[in-house]
Image (cartoon, coloured by chain):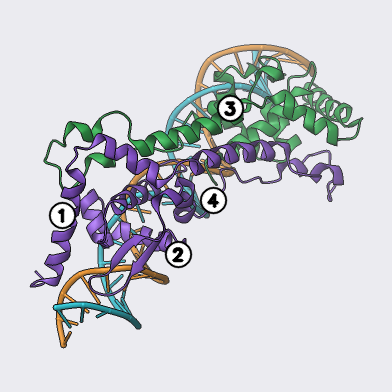
Chain colours: A purple, B green, C cyan, D orange
Amino acid sequence: MAHLTSRVEYGIHCLLWLVGAGEQQPSSRDLAELQGISPSFLAKIFPRLEKAGIVAAVPGLRGGYRLARPAAQITVLDIVDAIEGDKPLFECQEIRTRCALFDDPPPRWASRGTCAIHATMQRAERAMRDALAAETLADLARALERKAPADFGASVERWLGERASSRRGSAR
Amino acid sequence: MAHLTSRVEYGIHCLLWLVGAGEQQPSSRDLAELQGISPSFLAKIFPRLEKAGIVAAVPGLRGGYRLARPAAQITVLDIVDAIEGDKPLFECQEIRTRCALFDDPPPRWASRGTCAIHATMQRAERAMRDALAAETLADLARALERKAPADFGASVERWLGERASSRRGSAR
DNA sequence: TCAAACGCGGACTAATATAGTCCGCGTTAT
DNA sequence: ATAACGCGGACTATATTAGTCCGCGTTTGA
């Protein structure tokens, strides 16, 4: 995969289910099965979202996750950074100081300021991050809501509710 | 490394040496040793730049590379695409069609248009690519020229000239 | 004419990252 | 007490990256 990995893709999709979940607090297993992805893999993703303050975790039986703040205050960049850890698009290796014409301690001017190539890459990364910061979880949820039939949200809530009550019940 | 790899970093640094090379056409080995990187690794990078029409290759003894067009007409994006092959920042896996509430052929509306998450990532990638396309090799060369002492360009040309004549000579 | 250096490509290796799985801990509700 | 929860660490398989090595066809100075 590329720079924005499956972790981010899975994370956002499952956060979107959380937007319309109402009072419920689905577990990571609930979310994984609702979304059709690996439960054990999703279980590695959500703790990162919790530490970043995007979701709140409720421990114990009947526990699970809910959004820690309104969806309109969670940007896609917040999610990406929480999951991927703010890894840079480009890592400058300071190649500019390694020139056959330089002596062992390379001249000062060679490492003065930021490497021009690095600066260009940083501008590109900034542009990418700005674009990700411009979109919130609420925007994405609205886009999905427009596509789905009117009763779909209620169906999802019902499905999550059934999962929750089956846990309380005879414990399979 | 991240999404923009060492290949790109090495490629751009060595292309910059080519900007001020004048009439000379340094070999990839010349460029690698001038820049202090692995000659065999750089030798895998330059054929890609050649196929993209960024540099022109001259085969045979005394052969080497020169820019195929003016540095002002070579953007950083051109170089990145030539070396990395235009790989996307994000690969959508169409997770949206995999919902536990869907039947085996998922409903039409679920895959209607572009996935909203994918669209956001594509906007971010576009922003990144636009930023890379805004900078040319000539811009980078100018930035370096401002830092280096006035006679540095001439020293590099002399170094490359000596390498060239030592090839013609008694063969090491 | 012949060797040496060139570009080019393919096969190979080592290290790292990604996508997962599995197990055990402490917590909590039934 | 048990079962499900979040959490973390250890583990595996596969893909990518960084880099080496060798061989082919071309060109050219000795």
The residue type indicated by label 3 comes to Leu
**Labelled disc at residue A51:** 2
Distance CA(mark 4)–CA(mark 2): 17 Å
Left/right placement of residue A15 relative to residue A156 reads right
Residue bearing mark 4: A87
Find residue A25 and report its horizontal and vertical position in percent.
Answer: 27, 63
Look at discs 1 and 3 and give the one toward the viewer: 1
The residue type indicated by label 1 comes to Trp
Crowd around label 3: few <14 · some 14–19 · many ≥20 (10 Å): some
Find residue B33 and report its horizontal and vertical position in percent.
Answer: 73, 36
In this view, the residue in front, A34 or A85, is A34
Q: Which residue appears at 40% of the width and 54% of the height?
A: A70
Left/right placement of residue B97 relative to residue C3 reads left
Residue bearing mark 1: A159
Residue bearing mark 3: B77
Chain letter, disc 1 residue: A
Distance CA(mark 2)–CA(mark 1): 28 Å
Chain letter, disc 4 residue: A
Q: Which residue appears at 24% of the width and 60% of the height?
A: A29
Look at discs 4 and 2 and give the one toward the viewer: 2
Tell me, yes or no, whether the two marked residues, 3 and 2, touch with CB atoms within 8 Å.
no
Tell me, yes or no, whether the two marked residues, 4 and 2, touch with CB atoms within 8 Å.
no
The residue type indicated by label 2 comes to Lys
Distance CA(mark 3)–CA(mark 4): 21 Å
